[in-house]
Structures are given as C-alpha cells and as structure tokens.
Amino acid sequence: MPVPIIITIDGPAGAGKSTTARKVAEHLGYIYIDTGAMYRAVTLAAIESSTALTTEDLCALVTNVTIELRTDDRGQRTLLNGVDVSDRIRQPDVTSLVSRVSAEPCVREHLVALQRMMGQHGGVVMDGRDIGSVVFPHAHVKVYLVASIAERARRRVQDLTALGQHVNLDEVIAQIAERDRLDSSRQTSPLIKPDGAVEIDTTHRTIDEQVDDIIQLARNYQKAYHYITTYGNM
C-alpha cells in the first residue's frame, strides 16, 4: 500500500483480535502492536512485585517498568524489563487481574502515550479495547470484532490447552462474562464500538475471512485516498 495507514481492531476478549491483526499486518507488511499484551505485562509486574492494586501503587509501578514488543520467527514477543514474558502473561492469574489493572487511569494514560508514539507514523495494525475510540480515534480504518460468548470461551480454552493449561469451559465462560462487564463499565476508556468502526461478527467466520475483510477495507481506503489526492482539486 503506497500510503502507510493506521488500522485499529477493537473488541471483547476472545473475538479474534490478536490473530486477525497479526495476519493483516503480515499481509500488508505493517507493524503489529498488541496493546493487550502491554496491559498484561503491567499486571504481571504487579503480581511478581506483590504490588497492591491501589491507585498510588499502580501509578508508581507503571512508570518504573519497561515494556517492549519485538518480532521474531515465533511472532510478536512481549518483554517486561528485558525478559520475554509472552507466554507467562497469558496464564490465568494474569487474566483474572488484568481488567482491574487496566482500569486504573494512570496505567491507561501511560500506555496510551506509548501506543500513540509507536503508531504515530502509520503503517501499523493495533488491536485492543480502546484503540479506535481513544488511542487513535482518527484512524484511517477502524474495525470492531464481536463473537458469541460461547465461541470466545471455546477459543480461549483451545489457546490455553495449547500452552499446556487445563481449564474448565464453564469457568472460562464465567471469566469472559466478568471481563466483558468490567471492560464495558470502567470509567476510563470503556470498551465500546468506536465511531465509524465496521463491525465484523467472527462467530462463524474463519481467520482468513476476517483478514480478507479488513484488507479489503484498507484497500478501499487507499483507493479513495488516491482518487481524492489525484482528482480532488480538478
């Protein structure tokens, strides 16, 4: 694509954001930024340092950790203070607390500033829960992925099983329902469908179909941009 654009993909847990965003970025030759991993890294830092989940303690913590996103032959890796924690941040203890940590305004403010810096020049695909609504409300292409809670739970169980973790489906459904409630009701940057976002229900769609949909949206934007810049002043 001739003009590097910003593509945001928002949605609830298990809707397929990360896998879809990563594949879209690979196809376009863009940088993929998993913002959820950043919040999970802060949550892990709090767990490992036995930090109380108070405003004061979390605000002090988030300004004293280093979070990096790198890509290697395994895909995107998340580094916390120089240590690869990509698999660790997906474990249940982190999942159970990440909504609480990410709801803290100072945590969001710190990470949003970092995310904006990462994506300011375009050529990025960024996924999360407030990317198209808060981080980049003027993104060129905004997508909102949804799926039934049963399907999202099935995917989460599949992912955790692949990591060697054995979990109960009913418990995962309950966890996701609670995560939805917390994410949608928090005062700072709640999970919402961003203005202008195209909603895609992934319940019965394959990853490749989702990727194709978003790539087409990006191409449509590029065509419109090219037309306007070429003929707009005629």
Image: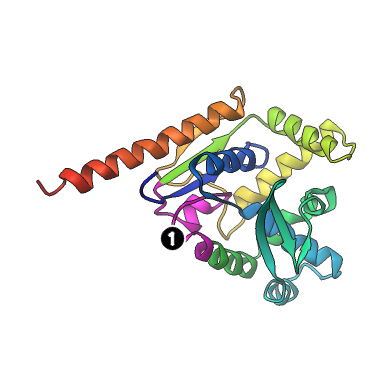
For label 1, the SS is loop
> Which residue is painted at 82% across and 53% down in the image?
88
The colour mode here is: rainbow
Residue 3 vs residue 87, the one in the foreground: 3
* In the image, residue 128 lies in the stretch drawn in magenta: yes
> Which residue is painted at 73% across and 40% down in the image?
176
* In the image, residue 89 lies in the stretch drawn in magenta: no
> Which residue is painted at 26% across and 43% down in the image?
226
What quarter of the picture does the N terminus occupy?
top left
Percent across and percent down for residue 84 are 78, 59
Q: Quadrant of residue 155?
A: top right
Residue 14 vs residue 19, the one in the foreground: 19
In the orientation shown, which residue stands out farthest toward the left? Answer: 234
Q: How many marks?
A: 1
23 over 85 or under it: above or below: above
Percent across and percent down for residue 130 are 54, 53
Q: Quadrant of residue 230?
A: top left
81 over 17 or under it: above or below: below
In the orientation shown, which residue stands out farthest toward the front? Answer: 73
In the orientation shown, which residue stands out farthest toward the top? Answer: 204
Percent across and percent down for residue 144 are 51, 40
**Residue marked by disc 1:** 121
Percent across and percent down for residue 22 are 60, 43
Classed neighbour count for the residue bearing mark 1: other residues with Cα under 10 Å, few (<14), some (14–19), many (≥20): few
Magenta-highlighted residues: 116-140
Q: Which residue type carries mark 1?
A: His
Specify whether 67 is left or right of 33.
right
